[in-house]
Each structure stands twice: as structure tokens, then as C-alpha cells.
């Protein structure tokens, strides 16, 4: 007889992080604790045991408490189970729904980490080794309502992403970058930009860059305390890790590099026989003169930057989550100045290398769009992430198992109106906070 019971921290995390296909930070113990502390949700860490008392599946269920002692349960990117094993999946569903009803849950939401389409960096479709339609149809048969193949960010978690296979050589990974991306990383390196791993004390700088990015893109997410708590929880658990990457520029070093390049150009000009130039030498002189003028302008420009902003500046700050065999670029904040240093590109490259050196299998850029029409305001985000050559993947989407039809209607139709009012109010408060930090 199968049974679904609560697991302790170590037994739960050891199973989830080591699962071959469904390990995900959104199913981690750390994510559950963050949601408890910062989102007011109650985490349930559950394990499914077979009749031989072997742990064969697990799931984090986040409980959102509602009026009149009702609630709903959400398994982010869950369940952690072999979805190709129909019998096992059906038993898991049966036990989870039984558990949900005992909590007076009006519905159970899942959005499994199941890829239904994949395209490589050449935009060639990659054949999957399973039939996702079989999984989709079985979930529907068991009573789950599929909420559709959305194209943007309508769902709780993004339905599209880019993933880099870290089992490739670093040379192969880099060769899949766009030509422009490779050039910008190279230029950033030549300008002596710096990428460092930050500590808890750098969360304030990270938050500042997040607010600048969010203000430009007209969305507001979390306050500084949220990011600090996330960092503490994920690094306080031996099974998970949050790493802060800081992309910086030291303007004095950059100016020295430009001056060295200028000296080299002047040396090349000095050895040209100015009085007797061949056609090719004239062309070379023209090009060297162009380079000289540009370098001189760059020196002047960076000296002006130094006067305005100071010598050392953090231009990019990215938070990477590592769990199991994967890493996710969860948050990224960037300044809108000194864009010609391409620090953001170099920062991405450094944490790709970091994740590969850590022995991880998958690097997930965590979110893009499926609607690639030219007027989509998120298209720029998509095109930027695409430049790093990952596989473009589409996930199966969200499902709801409804256990109380009346309150499900109230929650899904009426509550969103109230939420929009609260969201607008919170957005204004956070914008006021951003304005005070400028």
C-alpha cells in the first residue's frame, strides 16, 4: 500500500536534489522556507512511499490560507517523480488530492518541469525521448484542468526558457554564442572589467541595481529584505546555494588599457614612411588614424565618467541559484550607464563558467516568451537571452485540480480584481522607495 507522509528536511532534500530528471530549486526545502518567511505560505514537504517502504516520489506543496479556513495548494514545478510512469503518477495524484481535501483546499495547482518542445541554437527542433501528449492526456484524465499553452508571463512560473547543456566543452558552449555576444565579451575583457562573487553585504548594491532595472522596465518585484532573506536561507542549507555575481568597472584601469592601446597605435603610425606611402600603406594610415581619434575620445569620455560617478562602479549584479544538478539565473539587475563596457555580457559569461566548473549539468536562464511578434515588449529580453546559445524550451504549463467548484470560481474570477487593486498600491509604494534611493 502506498502512503504519502511528511518528510524531515534531510530526507526530503536528499531525494529531491538527487532526482535524475525533476530536481528543481522551486521544489527545494529552501524555497519552501523562503515562501513561509516572506510570502506567508505554509510549506508541506511530502514523500510517497511504495509498499516496500521505498521513497519513490516527493513534492513541496505551498499552502495559501484563505478565509473560512479554506486554502489552496501549489506544487511549483512539481511533482518530483517519473512522469513517464503512469501508474506511479496516478497514485501520487490520488494521495495528494486526498491530502489536499484534508486541508480544505479548494484546488491544487501544478506546473511540472516537463519540456514539450526544444530547439537548439540553430533553431532546429530537438526530438524528445518521451511523448509529452501521453503525460498531458493522463493528467487531464485524472481530473486536472489544463490552463492552456500561454505565450507570455501569464502563469505563475515562466512557460518558456533557455537552457545551456553544461556537459558540452566550454569551447562548444562559447561557439554557440552569437557573434555579437562573443565580440562584446571580448571587448569587456579587454577593458579590464571585473566580475566578482559578492557576499551578504553586497545585497544592498544588488537591490539598488534591481530597482533601476525594474523602474526602466515598468515592473516592481520585491524589497531589499526579500533578497537578503533568500540569500540567507539558500546559503544556510547545505543542499542549496545562492551566489551573487557583481560586474564592475575600475575606470582607472580601463583608462590605462585605452592609453596602452593608443600608445601601440601611435607606434605603428610612427614607423610608416609618411613621405612615400603605397596605396595599402595609405589605407593602413587612414585606419590607424581613425583608431587613434576614437581612443582619444574614449579617454576623454572615461575621464568624464570618473568625474561624474567615481572610479569604481558596480554595473551588473546577478543572483544565481544552484540546486541538485542545475543552476538558474533567478534575478539580474543592471545599470544603464557605461553600456559600452558590456559588463553585463561578461558577468553572464563568468557565471556560465562558474556553473560548469561546479560540475552542474544545466544552466537555466529562467524565463522568456513564446510570442515572438515584433511588437511584444518582452522581445528584447528574449533576444538577449537567445544570444547565449542555449536550447529554447517550452514547458507543459499549469494544471488545476478543482476540489470545490464554487470557491474556485470566486478565487479565480473575483479575487484577481481585488489583487489588482492591492498590486497597484504596492507598486506605487515601491516606486516611492526607489525614488528616495535615487
Image (cartoon, helix red, strand yellow):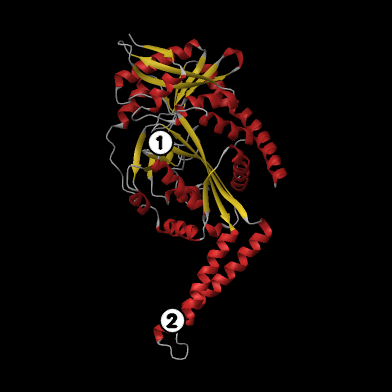
Is 325 drawn above or below residue 125 in the view shown?
Answer: above
Image quadrant for the N terminus?
Answer: top left
Q: Which residue is mark 2?
A: 283
Q: Residue furthest bottom?
A: 275
Q: Secondary structure at mark 1?
A: strand
Mark 1: few/some/many CA within 10 Å (<14, 14-19, 20+)? many
User: What residue is shown at x 33% (from left), y 29% (from top)?
Assistant: 20
**Residue 248: horizontal and vertical position, in percent?**
56, 52
Quadrant for residue 148, please give it: top left
Q: Which residue is mark 1?
A: 326
Q: Which is more toward the observer, 55 or 433?
A: 55
**Residue 163: horizontal and vertical position, in percent?**
39, 42
Mark 2: few/some/many CA within 10 Å (<14, 14-19, 20+)? few
Q: Residue furthest right?
A: 436
Q: Residue furthest top?
A: 1
Q: Is residue 112 left or right of residue 256?
A: left
User: What residue is shown at x 48% (from left), y 80% (from top)?
Assistant: 269
Q: Which is more toward the observer, 276 or 163?
A: 276
**Residue 159: horizontal and vertical position, in percent?**
44, 36
**Residue 261: horizontal and vertical position, in percent?**
50, 69
User: Is residue 428 visible from the viewing direction of this image?
Assistant: yes
Q: Which mark is residue 273?
A: none
User: Is residue 414 visible from the viewing direction of this image?
Assistant: no
Quadrant for residue 207, please give it: top right
Is 196 drawn above or below residue 412 in the view shown?
Answer: below
Amino acid at each position: 500500500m502506498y502512503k504519502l507522509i511528511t518528510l524531515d528536511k534531510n530526507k526530503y532534500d536528499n531525494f529531491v536534489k538527487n532526482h535524475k530528471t525533476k530536481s528543481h530549486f522551486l521544489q527545494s526545502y529552501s524555497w519552501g522556507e523562503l515562501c513561509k518567511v516572506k510570502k506567508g505560505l505554509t510549506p508541506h514537504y511530502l514523500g510517497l512511499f511504495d509498499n516496500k517502504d521505498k521513497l519513490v516520489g516527493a513534492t513541496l506543496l505551498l499552502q495559501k490560507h484563505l478565509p473560512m479556513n479554506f486554502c489552496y495548494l501549489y506544487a511549483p514545478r512539481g511533482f518530483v517523480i517519473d512522469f513517464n510512469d503512469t501508474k506511479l503518477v496516478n497514485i501520487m495524484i490520488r494521495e495528494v488530492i486526498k491530502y489536499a481535501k484534508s486541508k480544505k483546499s479548494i484546488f491544487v495547482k501544478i506546473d511540472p518541469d516537463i519540456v514539450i518542445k526544444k530547439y537548439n541554437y540553430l533553431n532546429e527542433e530537438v526530438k524528445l525521448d518521451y511523448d509529452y501528449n501521453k503525460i498531458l492526456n493522463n493528467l487531464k484524465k485524472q481530473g486536472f484542468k489544463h490552463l492552456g499553452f500561454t505565450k507570455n508571463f501569464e502563469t505563475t512560473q515562466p512557460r518558456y526558457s533557455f537552457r545551456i547543456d553544461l556537459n558540452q566543452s566550454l569551447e562548444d558552449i562559447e561557439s554557440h554564442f552569437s557573434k555579437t555576444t562573443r565580440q562584446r565579451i571580448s571587448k569587456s575583457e579587454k577593458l579590464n572589467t571585473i566580475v566578482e562573487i559578492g557576499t551578504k553585504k553586497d545585497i544592498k548594491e544588488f537591490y539598488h541595481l534591481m530597482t533601476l532595472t525594474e523602474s526602466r522596465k515598468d515592473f516592481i518585484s520585491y524589497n531589499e529584505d526579500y533578497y537578503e532573506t533568500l540569500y540567507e536561507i539558500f546559503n544556510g542549507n547545505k543542499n542549496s546555494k545562492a551566489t551573487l555575481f557583481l560586474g564592475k568597472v575600475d575606470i582607472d584601469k580601463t583608462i590605462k588599457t585605452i592609453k596602452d592601446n593608443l600608445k601601440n597605435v601611435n607606434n605603428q603610425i610612427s614607423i610608416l614612411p609618411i613621405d612615400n606611402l603605397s596605396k595599402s600603406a595609405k589605407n593602413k594610415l587612414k585606419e590607424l588614424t581613425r583608431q587613434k581619434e576614437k581612443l582619444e575620445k574614449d579617454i576623454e569620455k572615461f575621464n568624464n565618467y570618473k568625474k561624474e560617478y567615481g572610479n569604481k562602479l558596480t554595473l551588473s549584479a546577478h543572483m544565481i541559484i544552484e540546486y541538485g544538478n542545475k543552476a538558474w539565473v533567478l534575478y539580474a539587475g543592471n545599470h544603464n550607464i557605461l553600456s559600452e563596457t558590456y559588463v553585463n555580457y561578461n558577468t553572464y559569461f563568468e557565471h556560465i563558467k562558474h556553473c560548469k566548473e561546479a560540475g552542474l549539468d544545466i544552466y537555466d536562464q529562467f524565463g522568456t516568451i513564446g510570442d515572438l511578434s515584433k511588437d511584444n515588449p518582452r522581445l528584447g529580453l528574449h533576444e538577449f537571452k537567445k544570444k547565449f546559445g542555449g536550447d529554447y524550451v517550452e514547458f507543459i504549463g499549469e494544471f488545476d485540480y478543482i476540489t470545490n467548484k464554487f470557491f474556485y470560481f470566486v478565487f479565480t474570477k473575483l479575487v484577481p480584481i481585488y489583487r489588482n487593486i492591492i498590486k497597484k498600491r504596492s507598486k506605487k509604494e515601491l516606486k516611492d522607495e526607489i525614488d528616495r534611493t535615487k
